[in-house]
């Protein structure tokens, strides 16, 4: 929609409900939306699409939302991109928000681009920073480009709403305040719930389906592990710390571990608080996928391995020896 | 079965070098490759053609030199390559790119299924596939790792955060694929030879009925207003040999400070 032809106000958050529970990214986005709304003296609404809700909705208000647009329907039990895109587009046309934020999850990254196309506006993927331009009130969206080597700031000057997806854990869950809001259950036309897509089956594995991009700690292994079985020592440390297991591209290509674990430009770009690279030399395409991590530890035999150049701590030696030592030390500390 | 594949030519990330001073990538002189996930998309298309018969068209938007990606797709077995190229397309964001691709798909005819990679390694937005589907008004499936097409429906397995979602989708539809979908095949020698000589169909803005305001930078709702180079400078503490114990202590302390345990 063209900005000059629309009277748009408010910041909208598309929340995420997984199996009746409100995913924490919803609150992270509400916290950021509140900051943006305060700078523009406007309101925050959160949209939840679900079949049933097991969680308390008032915590959404305590996190900063003024209004909850709650759509409950049995057609929303599982994610259906067609229905989600139709409903979100409908609500945007109805309520005319100026800004829309959605999680950069597999859901958000599927329905929000479709919404952007349907209502003709811009969308910026995987934003790591959001702010309001003090000069003109426009949303400033910052995202890493070329694997985190540059940060691009993007605006949507002439179209509304200005839309962004944001990865989970990019912003923190805000402290809850003593505040309240209203719950609105919009009446939607039945045709929004019709779909040419039918969900046949859901399989909850938790394992390989777990997105390492959601993890605060990632322990990654490379060809320095020598053999696929040695991923066990990587996994042991990751499990101990409640982290995820990452991998270099050569190990995935050699089928030592599955593709969802691959870190790098051709896999996942991650930015955890702590990243440990074991037996990964540090090809550019790998570095570009992890160098924005908070703290980086590298374990490698080769003192000249490029991975050491981006590491806070370089442990030069045999990882088969070093990694179990580290794991044991942590296990002792935990007791 | 009429099948099409959307492909993008991207810089070869294996060839990219780092500028040690600026900490940025040096792209000059870097070769280009077909976006890796687009090869999985092409493989899925070729496999479907082998099962169900039909044709595979590959479409790519880019400068004239983007013919390399299309020729590679031809050498792997695609039937026809269409290059969408026009100076007006330059600077397109995902909306404006999708506009060009959607118009081309409409012009080329009624495809039963369109494949694309889940995202490109350069832009990393993953938005073009879903936007093209929405502009065409056809259903979409993303993050697909398995597909079975039968009796006018595609059954797809989507890899999501918590596991897998299996959906049954009415054709025509657009499917974006992940790397674990398949193992892309290799070009054949004869395929390479004929691909080198092959005539590419080239379509520009006027052939697609697009004007300056619909496409390229002018038609893009988003604008890049600033590029910063974050200086990620780390002082590396180096431990080896007998110092390794101290190094391990440092890592344990670091995890402590992060409240990791």
Image: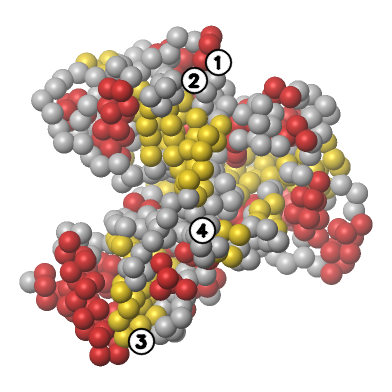
Q: Is residue A223 above or below residue B213?
A: below
Q: Which residue is mark 2?
A: A160
Provide residue A269's location: percent of width, then percent of height: 45, 55
Most distant residue in the bottom direction? B242
Comparing marks 1 and 4, which lies closer to the viewer?
Answer: 4
Can residue B79 be seen from the camera position used here? yes
Chain letter for the residue marked with disc 4 in the picture: B
Q: Secondary structure at mark 1?
A: loop
User: Image point 53% across, 11% down: which residue?
Assistant: A4
Q: Which residue is mark 3?
A: A318
Q: Secondary structure at mark 3?
A: loop
Provide residue A154's location: percent of width, then percent of height: 50, 34
* Marked residue nearer the N-terminal end (1 or 3): 1
Measure the alpha-carbon separation of dots 2 and 4: 36 Å
Q: Is residue A259 above or below residue A177?
A: below
* Picture disc at residue B163: none
Chain letter for the residue marked with disc 1 in the picture: A
Measure the alpha-carbon separation of dots 1 and 3: 60 Å
Measure the alpha-carbon separation of dots 2 and 3: 55 Å
Q: Which residue is mark 4?
A: B22
* Picture disc at residue A2: 1
**B104 left or right of B236?**
right
User: Image point 39% across, 43% down: which residue?
Assistant: A128
């Amino acid at each position: 929609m063209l900005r000059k032809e629309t009277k748009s106000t408010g910041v909208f958050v598309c929340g995420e409900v997984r199996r009746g529970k409100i995913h924490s990214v919803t609150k992270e986005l509400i916290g950021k939306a509140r900051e943006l709304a305060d700078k523009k003296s406007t309101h925050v609404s959160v949209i939840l699409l679900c079949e049933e809700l097991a969680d308390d909705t008032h915590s959404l208000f305590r996190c900063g939302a003024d209004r909850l647009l709650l759509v409950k329907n049995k057609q929303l039990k599982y994610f259906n991109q067609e229905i989600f895109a139709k409903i979100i587009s409908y609500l945007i046309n109805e309520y005319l928000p100026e800004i829309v934020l959605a999680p950069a999850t597999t859901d958000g990254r599927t329905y929000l681009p479709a919404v952007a196309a349907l209502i003709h506006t811009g969308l910026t993927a995987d934003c790591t920073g959001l702010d309001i331009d003090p000069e003109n009130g426009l949303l400033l969206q910052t995202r890493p480009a070329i694997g985190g080597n540059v940060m691009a700031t993007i605006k949507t000057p002439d179209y509304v709403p200005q839309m962004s997806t944001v990865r989970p854990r990019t912003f923190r869950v805000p402290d809850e305040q003593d505040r309240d809001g209203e719950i609105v259950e919009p009446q939607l036309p039945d045709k929004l719930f019709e779909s040419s897509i039918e969900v046949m089956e859901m399989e909850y594995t938790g394992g390989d389906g777990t997105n390492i991009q959601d993890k605060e700690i990632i322990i990654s292994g490379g060809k320095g592990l020598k053999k696929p079985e040695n991923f066990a020592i990587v996994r042991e440390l990751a499990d101990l710390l409640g982290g995820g297991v990452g991998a270099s591209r050569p190990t995935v290509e050699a089928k030592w571990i599955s593709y969802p674990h691959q870190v790098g430009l051709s896999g996942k770009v991650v930015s955890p608080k702590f990243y440990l690279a074991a037996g990964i030399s540090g090809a550019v395409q790998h570095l570009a996928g992890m160098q924005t991590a908070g703290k980086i530890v590298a374990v490698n035999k080769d003192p000249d391995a490029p991975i050491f150049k981006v590491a806070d701590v370089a442990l030069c030696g045999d990882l088969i020896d070093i990694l179990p030592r580290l794991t044991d030390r942590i296990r002792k500390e935990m007791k | 079965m009429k099948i099409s594949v959307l492909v993008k030519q991207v810089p070869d990330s294996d060839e990219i070098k780092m500028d040690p001073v600026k900490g940025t990538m040096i792209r000059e002189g870097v070769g280009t490759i077909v976006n890796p996930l687009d090869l999985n998309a092409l493989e899925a298309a070729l496999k479907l053609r082998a099962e169900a018969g039909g044709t595979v068209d590959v479409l790519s938007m880019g400068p004239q030199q983007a013919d390399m990606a299309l020729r590679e797709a031809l050498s792997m077995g695609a039937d026809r390559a269409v290059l969408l190229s026009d100076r007006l397309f330059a600077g397109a964001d995902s909306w404006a790119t999708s506009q060009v691709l959607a118009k081309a798909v409409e012009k080329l005819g009624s495809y039963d299924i369109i494949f694309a990679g889940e995202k490109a390694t350069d832009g990393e937005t993953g938005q073009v596939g879903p936007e093209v589907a929405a502009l065409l008004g056809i259903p979409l499936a993303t993050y697909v790792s398995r597909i079975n097409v039968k009796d006018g429906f595609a059954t797809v397995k989507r890899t999501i955060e918590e596991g897998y979602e299996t959906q049954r989708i009415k054709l025509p539809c657009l499917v974006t694929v992940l790397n674990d979908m398949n193992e892309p095949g290799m070009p054949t020698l004869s395929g390479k030879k004929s691909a080198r000589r092959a005539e590419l169909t080239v379509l520009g803005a006027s052939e697609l009925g697009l004007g300056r305001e619909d496409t390229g930078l002018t038609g893009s709702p988003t604008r890049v207003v600033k590029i910063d180079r974050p200086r990620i400078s780390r002082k590396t503490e180096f431990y080896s040999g007998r110092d390794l114990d101290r190094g391990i202590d440092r890592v344990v302390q670091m995890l402590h400070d992060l409240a990791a345990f």
